Image (spheres, rainbow, N blue to C red):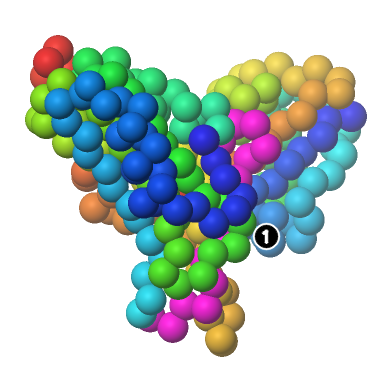
Amino acid sequence: MIRVQYFGWLAEAAGMRSEEVAGASTVGVLRAMLASRIAGLGDAAKVRALVNDACVGEGFALEDGVEVGFLPPVSGG
Amino acid sequence: MICAEPIDPAALLARFAASHADAGAVVSFTGAVRGTGGIVALELEYHPSFTAKVIAQIGADAKDRFGIEECLIVHRVGSLRPGEAIVFVAAAAARRRAAFEAVDYAMDRLKTEAPLWKREVRHDGAEWIEARESDVADRARWEDSNADR
């Protein structure tokens, strides 16, 4: 299982802050699985994927037990 | 660094300046929650580990790029009221130009890269904020200038 965390407005779009997902071999596969029910998540150019405090690309392989954070465009400062 | 409690910019500046008493120049910036526009509260969400890491990196990059003694960044998270300080950035350097630019550079990077998400809460609802085009343009300024100062 992969633990997915949603930040910013993504959590509202997802209706939750985190969830467990099975069957995603890469970030791209995970994103495609979730994008159908979470508006905005599918845009890889805008929503970054984070694993172990580093942004990763769509081809990044996901191992069982990993945590993936989806980060929408930022607005700090 | 990030802070979940109210910050005191004057105290932060005094402490920073005292710890760089031999620096010829100390520059600081404080960003605060605007008191106009009907904002009841400003909420700042952060990532439990990535946010602090990115902010520390921005401070280190500012220090290296402008050859200064230190660039301090303190950023609030949580719920803030109008008038409260959101972010404090200070730079200590031998000369003023590097100190000014380090603070300016750090703010432009914070605005476009720091993993923080603002939500403005008003009486009639709340709205997530996005970085402005002007923030992106400001950030791009630093790519054109000579990094070897």
Residue B21 rendering spot, x and y as whole percentages: 27, 26
* The quarter of the displayed image where residue B126 is located: bottom right
Q: Residues within 10 Å of mark 1 (few under 14, many from 20)?
A: some
Q: Residue at x 71, y 17 (%)?
A: A61
Between residues B13 and B122, which one lies in front from this camera angle?
B13
Tell me: residue B62, above or below residue A7.
Answer: above
Residue B44 painted magenta: yes
> Which residue occupies the extreme bottom position in the image?
B124
* The quarter of the displayed image where residue B132 is located: bottom left
Residue B99 rendering spot, x and y as whole percentages: 19, 31
Q: Residue at x 11, y 31 (%)?
A: B96
Residue B111 painted magenta: no
Amino acid type shown at disc 1: Ala
Q: Residue at x 22, y 39 (%)?
A: B27
User: Is any part of residue A71 visible from this angle?
Assistant: yes
Q: Is residue B63 left or right of residue B77?
A: left
Give the residue at mark 1. Answer: A13
Quadrant of the image for the C terminus of chain B? Answer: top left
* The quarter of the displayed image where residue B33 is located: bottom left
Between residues B36 and A16, which one lies in front from this camera angle?
B36
State how many labels appear: 1
Residue B56 rendering spot, x and y as whole percentages: 47, 27
Tell me: residue B41, above or below residue B9.
Answer: below
User: Is any part of residue A44 visible from this angle?
Assistant: no
Q: Residue at x 35, y 42 (%)?
A: B14
Mark 1: which secondary structure? helix
Q: Which residues are magenta?
A: B37-51
